[in-house]
Image (tube, rainbow, N blue to C red):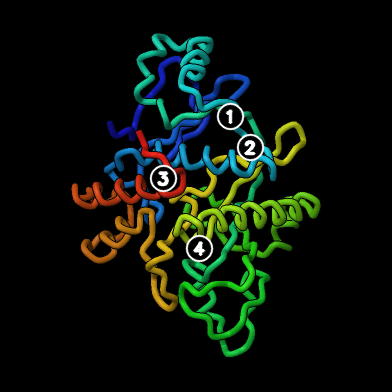
């Protein structure tokens, strides 16, 4: 089953994102991670089998690992409890939704999301690489408030992981900012905590992943306030929010094979003439299957379990 579009009759939808559907349960939210996939900010027509389950289960794994660092928004991921909650919320025949929701759904607290994304970079890649190359003139480079040496190359390790937050854009791309600029948005006290937690979480995950033969190039976190406490929300260290590289294939100075939707991006960039505007092209079966296998492989390596 590939889950891309669905409705739960009798439940009010709170929000619909590129991947997640969020329903209002009154005292909490029901968060369903679909199999939708986007590229260049456009949701593509095809879904990727098991993608939503992979993202949900990997997030749950990391949330559990870092719970001594910071609390998270999870109330339950147990499908029986979820079905019971739907029943109490007035959903007619909630059992009808079990197959769709199982493995990809969580109930979470109603936190107040903070208006920045917390990005940690351990290697020079992506938008940071593009910006770095623009401003590298032979002297130290100030990148989003972080000082990097001149002459770095693509995929090169950054001596010390750095915190480079961004704004949240309603449409289009987020804008990278410095930690000081983030503090101006959320306040110094919260801003300092966000940097501390982000770096601490990244380093723990990086060290664990290294034992599994995975390099976590970079990642992004979202935080919120709940009962005046800072908690981590949304997802954590998934192939959608992070770049995972195969350590055995790593070689600085070039792009790295990754456990994510890079297969889709490469196909769209090299084998189509798509203008990167809606609607996106239909993906061929082999690209869909390859991408699904990459997501499942990442889940298996990190958690030690097969996706069901």
- 3 or 4: tag closer to the N-terminus: 4
Q: Which mark is residue 217?
A: 4
Instruction: Look at mark 2 in the image and give the residue it sits on.
Output: 72
Residue, disc 3: 299
Q: Residues within 10 Å of mark 1 (few under 14, many from 20)?
A: many
What residue is shown at x 27% (from left), y 59% (from top)?
268
Q: Position of residue 20 (x, y in %)?
A: 45, 37
Image location (x, y in percent) of residue 155: 47, 72
Give the Cα distance between marks 1 and 2: 9 Å
Marks 3 & 4, CB-CB < 8 Å contact: no
Label 4: which secondary element: strand
First along the sequence among labels 3 and 2: 2
Q: Is residue 22 above or below residue 198?
A: above
Q: Earlier in the sequence, mark 3 or mark 1?
A: 1
Q: Which of marks 4 and 1 is in front?
A: 4
Q: Is there CB contact under 8 Å for labels 3 and 1?
A: no
Q: In this view, does 25 lie to the left or right of 240?
A: right
Residue receiving disc 1: 108
Decide if residue 267 is on the left or right side of residue 113.
left
Distance (Cα) linking label 4 and label 2: 23 Å
Tell me the distance, in whole angstroms, between the alpha carbons under discs 4 and 1: 28 Å
Which secondary structure lies at badge 2?
A: loop
Q: Earlier in the sequence, mark 4 or mark 1?
A: 1
Residue 35 coordinates in the image, percent (x, y):
35, 39
Q: How far apart are marks 3 and 2 (CA)?
A: 20 Å
Mark 2 neighbour class, 10 Å CA radius: few under 14, some 14 to 19, many 20 or more: many
């Amino acid at each position: 089953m590939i889950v891309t579009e669905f409705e739960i009759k009798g439940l009010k939808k709170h929000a619909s994102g590129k991947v997640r559907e969020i329903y209002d349960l009154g005292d909490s939210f029901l968060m369903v991670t679909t199999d939708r996939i986007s590229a260049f900010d456009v949701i593509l027509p095809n879904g990727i089998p098991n993608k939503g389950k992979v993202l949900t289960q990997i997030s749950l794994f990391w949330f559990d690992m870092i719970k001594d660092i910071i609390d998270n928004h999870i109330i339950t991921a147990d499908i029986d409890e979820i079905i019971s909650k739907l029943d109490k919320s007035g959903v007619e025949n909630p059992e009808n939704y079990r197959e769709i929701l199982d493995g990809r759904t969580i109930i979470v607290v109603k936190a107040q999301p903070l208006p920045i994304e917390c990005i940690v970079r351990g290697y020079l890649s992506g938008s940071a690489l593009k910006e770095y190359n623009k401003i590298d003139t032979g002297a130290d480079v100030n990148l989003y408030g972080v000082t990097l040496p001149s002459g770095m190359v693509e995929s090169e390790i950054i001596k010390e992981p750095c915190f480079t937050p961004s704004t949240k854009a309603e449409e289009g791309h987020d804008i990278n900012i410095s930690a000081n600029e983030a503090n101006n948005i959320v306040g110094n006290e919260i801003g300092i905590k966000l940097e501390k937690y982000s770096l601490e979480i990244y380093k723990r995950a990086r060290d664990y992943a290294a034992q599994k033969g995975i390099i976590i190039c970079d990642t992004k976190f979202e935080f919120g306030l709940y009962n005046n406490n800072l908690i981590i929300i949304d997802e954590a260290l998934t192939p959608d929010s992070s770049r995972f590289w195969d350590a055995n294939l790593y070689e600085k100075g070039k792009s790295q094979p990754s456990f994510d939707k890079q297969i889709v991006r490469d196909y769209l960039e090299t084998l189509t003439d798509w203008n990167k505007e809606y609607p996106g092209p239909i993906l061929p079966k082999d690209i869909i299957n390859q991408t699904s296998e990459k997501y499942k492989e990442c889940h298996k390596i990190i958690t030690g379990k097969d996706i069901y």
